[in-house]
Amino acid sequence: MSAAAEGPADYARRCVVALVEGHEPPAAPDEPLYRRPSACFVSLKKRGDLRGCIGTLAPEEHDLGHEIARNAYGAAFRDPRFPPVQPPELDELTCSVDVLGPPEPCDPADLDPARYGIIVSAGWRRGVLLPDLPGVDSVARQVAIALQKAGIPAHEEYTVQRFTVRRFREGDPEGIECGDAGCVPGCGERPGDDRPAS
């Protein structure tokens, strides 16, 4: 695959391989997509099962290339649900990258769990759920899971924001907007698997 055709998931994989082997992450492809600031999640799967996932809800770096490298490191080494990735695992891993659009305030009537991810907030508590997850087929379920993740009782006052996601898999430099046919689950294979980097 040429560097020009490399998508975010392919770049994330190169970062993971370099980092696990003890090297600095490679430079991102010199393409416009990688030069703009964007939040993202990097997901690792091993034989189809989640192996690590870390992401950001707002850009922490000055461009997407650095954001992917940062979250690739987090997915490989900082996801508290899993031990750090070891070199013998690398051939069994696949990467995906979810690039997030900016969050916008909304009412529950404006939500669509296939198309939009959500952030629910009450004070310092915040719950996040990516879109297009198996088993999350209604707004009520999407909101309930996000509230549970945040530890916010349903009767308490909270705010809701929604965001779009463009999901990239290895070998796919174009990605698919969640809600479109062909979008497959990324980080949130099971409700609760997605989490922002701390």
Image (cartoon, rainbow, N blue to C red):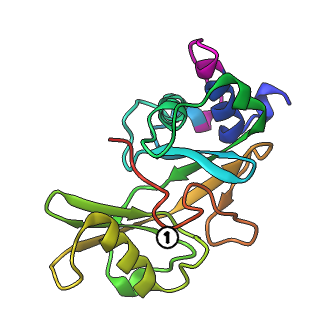
Judge whether residue 79 is colored magenta. no
How many tags in the picture? 1
Answer above or below: position of 101 versus 133: above
Segment tinted magenta in the rendering: 18-33
Residue at image x 36%, y 46%?
58
Left or right for 56, reference 186:
left
Answer above or below: position of 60 versus 114: above
Of 177 and 79, the residue lying toward us: 79
Quadrant of residue 31 within the rendered picture: top right
Q: Main secondary structure of the magenta part?
A: loop
Task: Report whether residue 157 is seen.
Answer: yes
Q: SS at mark 1?
A: loop
Task: Report whether residue 27 is seen.
Answer: no
For the N terminus, which image quadrant? Answer: top right
Residue at image x 83%, y 27%?
2
Query: Furthest residue to the top?
Result: 23
Percent across and percent down for residue 70 are 47, 30
Percent across and percent down for residue 78 are 44, 34
Label 1 crowd bin: few (<14), some (14–19), many (20+), radius 10 Å: many
Left or right for 96, reference 68:
right
Residue at image x 51%, y 29%?
73
Quadrant of residue 197 within the rendered picture: top left
Answer above or below: position of 22 versus 54: above
Percent across and percent down for residue 189 are 60, 62
Residue tagged by mark 1?
A: 116
Residue at image x 64%, y 19%?
18
Answer above or below: position of 71 versus 122: above
For the C terminus, which image quadrant? Answer: top left
Left or right for 124, reference 178:
left
Q: Give the residue type that dot 1 points to.
A: Tyr
Percent across and percent down for residue 115 are 55, 72
